[in-house]
Amino acid sequence: MFNNLEFLSNPPTKQEFAVTFRLASRISFWVQLALGSVSGIALLLACFSRNITTQTNNAGIGFSILLAIVGILLLCFRVYWAWRYRRLAKLLQAPSYQNQPKKEHVIQNLRIGLIVSLLGLLIAFIASEGTVAVILGKALAQPQGVAVYQPENVIRSLDVFVMLANVNMIGAHFFGGVTSLSLLYWVED
């Protein structure tokens, strides 16, 4: 079994790294784009499903929406960064050594991607925790089997859409972070 993992312990050649970098960046780009799109659509549905006439006085869900918007913006940057990884991988495969980026430049780009993913992961996690706390509070405030007459205790679709957006952002930022971390680990050996 350890013989199968031996190739990971050896430093990769520039060509091996470029092929792996290009494949990983392509997969990362599409996974993050898909999860980010689901998050964006869920967040838009949450924003447009708010009933303006209903006063809920719930700051928790508003804060979660704000953090979700920040997380989406970070995810947009991260999707752009994954696209940039693809361009960087193409440059690494260029036949001319003059056009190829230096190892330090590649490492710096991977670190920036990792930092943005970790920051987005933290923000999406805090937003998810806030949304779960609001949903749990509303669920516990409802007596079981009795009609609810207080609108602030009703679990609305807004709450569920915000939770869906935040969970998908966690997945997207996690996937981007794992991609950057694994490539960074491999190139620094």
Image (cartoon, helix red, strand yellow):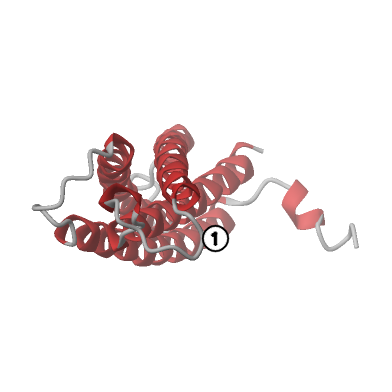
Could you say where residue 166 lies in the image, as x and y percent from the top left?
39, 51
In the rendered view, does 185 fall on the left or right side of 103? right
Seen as rendered, the residue at the extreme left is 53
Q: Nearer the viewer, residue 78 or 51?
A: 51
Task: Using the rendered view, name the quadrant where residue 120 is placed.
Answer: top left
Q: Nearer the viewer, residue 56 or 161?
A: 56
Element under disc 1: helix
Q: Nearer the viewer, residue 33 or 55?
A: 55
Residue at point 34%, 44% (across, down): 98
Quadrant of the image containing the C terminus: top right
Could you say where residue 144 lies in the image, as x and y percent from the top left?
51, 60
| Residue at numbered disc 1 | 20
Could you say where residue 183 lies in the image, as x and y percent from the top left?
56, 48
In the rendered view, does 11 fall on the left or right side of 141? right
* CA neighbours of label 1 inside 10 A, class few (<14), some (14 to 19), many (20+): some
Is residue 12 in view?
yes
Residue at point 10%, 52% (across, down): 52
Residue type at tag 1: Thr
Is residue 87 in view?
no
User: Total of numbered circles in the picture?
Assistant: 1
Could you say where residue 24 lies in the image, as x and y percent from the top left?
50, 60
Residue at point 14%, 57% (across, down): 51
Q: Nearer the viewer, residue 84 or 136?
A: 136
Quadrant of the image containing the N terminus: bottom right
Residue at point 35%, 58% (across, down): 148
